[in-house]
Amino acid sequence: MTYEEDHKSLLNDLKAGDRNAIAFVYENYRKLLTVSAIVILKDEEAAKDLVQQFYIDFFEQRLYLRIRSGNNLKTYLVSCVRNRCLNKVRDMRRSQKKMEKIIDKFPTAEAERITIEENDIWTKDQITRQKLNAALTQTYREVPVSAKTLELRYFQGLSREEIAERTGVTVNTVKNNLKRALSILRKHFKNANDK
């Protein structure tokens, strides 16, 4: 009999700390959890990072001990990841509202002096507050996780390492999120200038 056929044994073995059960849970549910996270977050890298962090918490904090014997493990895992995704989306929306308030208070003269070190997309073009607001709003629509990273980096002044620590992702993911957000901004400004 395999774990696919006997979920009760899987849960019992998992609670007993059986390495085979732990490996089974990781290998057999990882893809499902990642796809579930992608559907909500709309960002593959962020979804992978969230699922990875969930597994770390699940095994290190022994969250599996909280599952009641009659409960379905698969349903529990999907529900946990879904809740984490919804919390992340809620946090992103709050951040977006904060960003909009910051932009509304942002003086035009300051906006014209902004530069971004990674891609220098704002060094050549003078930016008005209206263009900045439109570009950031578009970035939040297309890649909310990347836009949040951009906010932490350039509006809150955090380093890549600090962002990685705060958001629970790798420094490499932070770099990728910044590149993605900057790419959307660049495209938005190019389209605005072409009009």
Image (tube, rainbow, N blue to C red):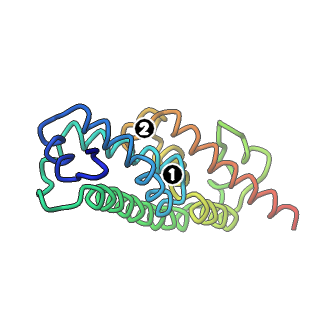
Residue drawn at (38%, 40%) of the image: 27
In this view, the residue in front, 115 or 110, is 115
Contact flag, marks 1 and 2 (Cβ < 8 Å): no
- Residue 140's tag is none
Query: Residue 145 appears at what percent x and percent y?
Result: 50, 54
- In this figure, which residue is indicated by the disc labeled 2? 164
Judged from the image, the secondary structure of the residue bearing numbered disc 2 is: helix
- In this figure, which residue is indicated by the disc labeled 1? 151
The image quarter in which residue 52 lies:
top left
Judge left or right: residue 33 versus residue 179: left
In this view, the residue in front, 89 or 191, is 89
Query: Residue 187 appears at what percent x and percent y?
Result: 76, 55
Query: Residue 8 appears at what percent x and percent y?
Result: 17, 53
Which tag is nearer the camera, tag 1 or tag 2? 2
| Residue placed furthest toward the front | 1
| Amino acid under disc 1 | Glu
In this view, the residue in front, 191 or 40, is 40
Residue drawn at (84%, 61%) of the image: 193
The image quarter in which residue 25 lies:
top left
* Crowding near the residue tagged with mark 1, few <14, some 14–19, many ≥20 C-alpha atoms within 10 Å: many
Q: Say which quadrant the C terminus sits in.
A: bottom right
Q: Say which quadrant the N terminus sits in.
A: top left
* Crowding near the residue tagged with mark 2, few <14, some 14–19, many ≥20 C-alpha atoms within 10 Å: some
Does label 1 or label 2 sit earlier along the sequence? 1
Query: Residue 191 appears at what percent x and percent y?
Result: 81, 62
Residue drawn at (51%, 67%) of the image: 100
Measured along the vertical axis of the image, is residue 192 above or below residue 16? below
In this view, the residue in front, 143 or 21, is 21
